[in-house]
Amino acid sequence: MARLRIGSRGSQLALWQANHVAALLRDQGHKVEIEIIKTTGDKITDVALAKVGTKGMFTKEIEEALHDHRVDLAVHSLKDVPTELEHEFELAAIMKREDPRDAFISVKFSSLDELPHGAKVGTSSLRRQCQLKAMRPDLEIFPLRGNVDTRLRKLESGEYDAIILAAAGVLRLGLDQHARARIPADIMCPAVGQGALAIEIRRADQQTQAFLAFLNHTDTRQAIECERALLGSLGGGCQVPIGAYAEKRGGGLHLRAMVGRPDGSEILREQAEGADAEKLGRDVAQALLKRGADKILRDVYAQEAVVPGQP
């Protein structure tokens, strides 16, 4: 069979994901190697993600390795993948989604409701911050960067009363004992693609595409295409206060979505059902735009314009 080289970020979670895919490919008889590639998002660790205005900050350098034929495929957390790929690349597979929800993690408290007035909560996601502040305007939200282990250490050392992480990442690393609760999607709408893995290849590489076909999960792919159509229609990137979660219901999809101000003072929510994934995403985006989502997003982009140069 083939010798396949996987490009991956070097974080513990990214390597778990790459090794997971490598094991599945080895079961098919392929020889697999993993090449660790440091991305812009890995190099900038002292700035909140929302302020790092670099498109594809967790994928660009890996795509360069794909372009140069140094790797044959890349394994990404789907929520890190820009909605528009360069023409030479494609997502050959979207794997079955893990839990898409956000996890509430705390040493002392078992839920958001239990947090005392003025409690310190760590997250670098404007989407999470926005929904947290809407529920609990008394909470103090602080930036939280670093890999999962680093974030947990900061929590355990007492820097935060609670942190919010993607449930899927915590589960994949076997750290789910730290998660005190999963926050329902109708309370905290997940990020587009949260919980799903994407495998990116060169569009012209039909052989690798054929090798990866068995990893593609049709229902997950349809849901993700719906969510990404919404995000693309809103003109949003992965670090803006936009949430979307599509799931199979009957013969179609149910999509819920939100756009909000980072301080939680205004949140727009919409939901709808439909059979055409991309049309459903675009229609819900238009409904949000008609209600003022475009003004919210313009204001967010104006406020978050401070960015460091490429390292």
Image (tube, helix red, strand yellow):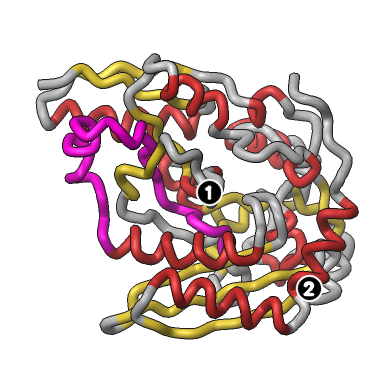
The disc at residue 130 is none
Q: Quadrant of residue 218?
A: bottom left
Let me know if residue 70 is in the magenta part.
no
Q: Is residue 131 left or right of residue 137?
A: left
Bounds of the magenta segment: 190-218
Cα gap from disc 2 to disc 1, whole angstroms: 31 Å
Q: Which residue is mark 2?
A: 134
Crowd band around label 2 with a 10 angstrom C-alpha radius: few (<14), some (14–19), many (20+): some
Residue at 47%, 43% in the rendered image:
77
Q: Identify the mark nearer the N-term, 2 or 1.
A: 1
Provide residue 274's location: percent of width, then percent of height.
40, 83
Can residue 130 be seen by looking at this rendering? yes
Label 1 sits on residue: 84
| Residue 58 left/right relative to 131 | left
Q: Amino acid at mark 1?
A: Glu
- From the top left corner, tell me how far across and down residue 190 is, in percent: 56, 63
Is 202 magenta? The answer is: yes
For the point 38% across and 54% down, the residue is 98
Q: Which quadrant, please, contains the N terminus? A: top left
Element at badge 1?
Answer: loop
Q: Is residue 39 left or right of residue 300?
A: left
Q: Quadrant of residue 92?
A: top left
How far across and down, in percent of the image, does residue 170 sit?
50, 45
Q: Nearer the viewer, residue 135 or 116?
A: 135
